[in-house]
Image (tube, grey):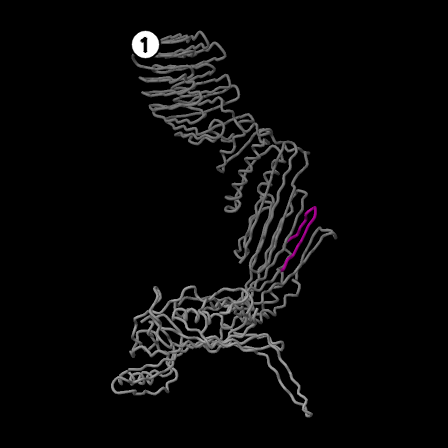
Amino acid sequence: MFRMEAPYPILQTLTVMPNPQFSDQETNLNTVSRKLAMDGTRYTYVKRRVRRKMLWSFRLSRNKALEVRAFFMSYFASKIRITDHRNRVWLGYFTSNPFEFDTPSRAAPAISPMPKGETQTIDIEFEGEEQ
Amino acid sequence: MLCVTRQQVETLASGIGEVRVTRQVVEALAAGIGKARVTRQFVEVLSTVASPPIEVEATSTLSLSEEANREVILGYGVTDTLSLTEAANRIFVVSDTLDLSDSAIRVIIKSCIDTLILAEEATLEVPHFAVDTLSLTEDIAREAMEFLRSVAEDIILGEVIDLGLVKICRKNETIILSDEATFDLIKPAVDILVVTEHAVVDRVLVCIDTLSLTEGISVEMVWMRPADESLSLTEQAGVNKEVLRDAADTLVVTEANVAHYCKVGIDDISLTDEAGFIIVKWGADILSLIEDAGRAGSEYGRKRIETLALSDSATGVKQKDKSASESLSLGESATGIREVVGSATESLSLSEVVDAANVRSAFDTLTLWETPGYTSNRQFANDELIDLAELAESGFIRYRDAVDNVALNLTEKAYPGFRRLSAADQLQTVHIDYDPITYEEIITYEGLRDSATYYLIPATPRPAVDAIFFGEQATCIKINYNAIPESADDTLVMSDAAYLVTTGAAVDVLSATDAAAVIKSSLFADELDFTEEAETTVIRNSLGASDTLTLGEAVLWYNVLEDYLWVYHPFVGTGPDTNPEPPPSELEGPIPGITEFKLLYPSVGPFTDTLILRAPKLGNRDRLQMNRVSRETRGGTLIVYADPMWPKVQTLALNFSGLTWAEASGLHTFMDAHLGMEIGMLDWEHRFWKGILMKLDDPIVQDGPGCKYSVGFEFEGEMATYNP
């Protein structure tokens, strides 16, 4: 279960999504800068960040994609609380731009009252701090 | 806008001996948009001195008791109608129906066939001339009677009725006294009827008759009639009565009772005790006594003398010398013409004061305001009471606009009180424009408006506080740049304030107030300088050095900033006040089964160009591109900024395959025709978009023989309502 809630801290909207596809990414944003002195001494300059950069790819039904689309339209710049598929809670912002919904294939046979239709994929890039 | 309110509370008199006459006047003389408020409160205690005492009697004298005996004199030649209601004096119907109720004493004289119905305890006399029927119901005067005249008549009396009955019957007559009543019946000449128990009735018919009641009631009656007559006296009704028909009669009522008269000719009726009446009638009349007529008011309708005023001074018609209680019935005569002449006690009664208040009130609304030439004659035996009356009149404020050039007809003697004058000068220019649509005139005033108001409370003989108020309000309706120089000075000039020469014996207060308010102005108008003190010339005569002159000035203005200041609220991603609008609770899902894809021009119908394609291939993309600014602080915190007004670009990337050449080339034709123009797009989910075609460089590719043309484009726009 993947939950997106916004805006934080006064949450108004919750969107529940399926777990992301494989190949999700979590990036450490710490940086280190190495400098070598003339005598070969190595100096490192470190910039630590608590933030993580996450990349999730979701495969959604068309209706759910419309819901997520509306969520993006409203909270594309708001602080988001995300509970990921590992039940970790993140606070941060979407950094995707643009949000692009692809329509790779048709959906499975519809589950009433869901219409038959298409599946869509969306890649979400997110930077936030784990709570 | 000028709002003038006024509040006035007056208590003219209260108590007996100690008279406090208080008056309080509160006026908000002006209050409007100009923010000028001239408020005046004036409190006067007009008199607290008991010496000389204002003789005011208690209200106990206000009412004539309901049991007041009433005398009614009535002479009818033929048909008369008298209707009496309530406890009034009742009388008379000839050839009519008379209903008497309550405890009145009635005398009824009939000439023809009548029906008389007396209810309850009424006491009555009924002379009949012809065949009549008199029925007394209940215990009317403890009597029940029936008269049958001219021929056989029956008289039935019931119970303990003191009855004097004189009848002249030509032949057979029957008188039945059921109970203790005693009768003597004498006829057809000089008769003596003696009622042995309570009443003794003597009566002489045809000629001069004498009817006497033995107990406390004495009745003398002289009656000369050509026909049958009857007289019934009941119980305590002591009546001396003389009726002289066809000639001069004299009727004397000895006690303080009611007398009823029915005369044909000139009569003189004198009431010896408290009540005195002289009523002269000549012919058929209509006499109606309404309500408390016996004590309050009456109306007489006659052929000759038609108006009988109940007031004492109704000369010639009726003279009433009343006791104090009688003179208290003045309220009815509030119809304008009224003279009250009474003794000191009468005129000084509290009822007079109350009545004066009523009259004063009438003057306030009807006379002083509407009829300046109103005059009132009052005669009071006490000067103090005159003062009260004067006070009553003084409670009014006369307002005249000087522009009207109508002189105020206020004399200090007649109408001491407040006066207020106002003058308005308008230093304005008028522009008349025409509405190009309606062709109506639009009048625009520009400039300054200067108004001066003037209030005067003339000195009164009373030792009280006299206040003089000057008020000026300068209101600028609209000031343009070229109106400032000429209008500023005028605004600040108080009109020659030498309105007043106050000779008040007590404290004089002169307050001058100047206020200038700019209602609407341009930027130039804000620079108006009102700092100059209003030049006010105050002339005071007979005032000592201790007088206080207070001049105050205030300038108020509004700066209208709405048109010049734009309040900018940046939108930041967090914070309770900048929460973005949440997504709608319900979203319209796609409508399956739509296979057509339409490009429409224009975007708002009716559409003049339509291109229909099959649905695009899978792999179409819906791209949302929002503008936002992401910054990372030195500490590593990510801050995201966005403004709601920043554009959000929605792009659909579509590819089509399996098109015919006509469809593929038609798309190019459509693109050529409407390049850069807003078109409509009805997609395969039956959602309508408005936007433009982008990325037009996608080639048409023929993937195979037949309908295997493919092409693509991007559409940038937003969803809209499909309204073909």
Residue B343, horizontal then vertical, whole percent: 58, 28
What residue is rendered at 70% in x and 46% in y? B506
Q: Nearer the viewer, residue B197 or A98?
A: A98
* Parent chain of label 1: B
Residue B643, horizontal then vertical, whole percent: 51, 73
- Relative height, residue B88 to residue A116 (above, below): above
Residue B116, horizontal then vertical, whole percent: 36, 21
Q: Quadrant location of the C terminus of chain A?
A: bottom right
Q: Which amino acid does the dot numbered 1 rest on? A: Glu
What span is in magenta?
A: B500-514
Looking at the rendered structure, the secondary structure element under dot 1 is strand
- Relative height, residue B669 to residue B633 (above, below): below
Can the viewer see residue B610 in this picture? no
Q: Nearer the viewer, residue B211 or A107?
A: A107
Q: Nearer the viewer, residue B492 or B412?
A: B492
Residue B197 lies left or right of residue B590; in this view the side is right
Please give the residue where the numbered disc 1 appears in the rendered image: B173
Residue A110, horizontal then vertical, whole percent: 34, 68
Q: Residue furthest left?
A: B706
Please check the rendered image and state whether residue B505 is part of the magenta-colored stretch, yes or no.
yes
- Relative height, residue B74 to residue A91 (above, below): above
Examine the image and state in which quarter residue A9 appears: bottom right
Q: Circle 1: is it few (<14), some (14-19), or many (20+) Cα within 10 Å? A: some
Q: Nearer the viewer, residue B613 or B200?
A: B613
Please check the rendered image and state whether residue B48 is part of the magenta-colored stretch, yes or no.
no
Q: Residue furthest right?
A: B545
What residue is rendered at 47% in x and 76% in y? B647
Examine the image and state in which quarter residue B197 appears: top left
Q: Residue furthest bottom?
A: A38
Examine the image and state in which quarter residue B588 appears: bottom left
Can the viewer see residue B698 in this picture? yes
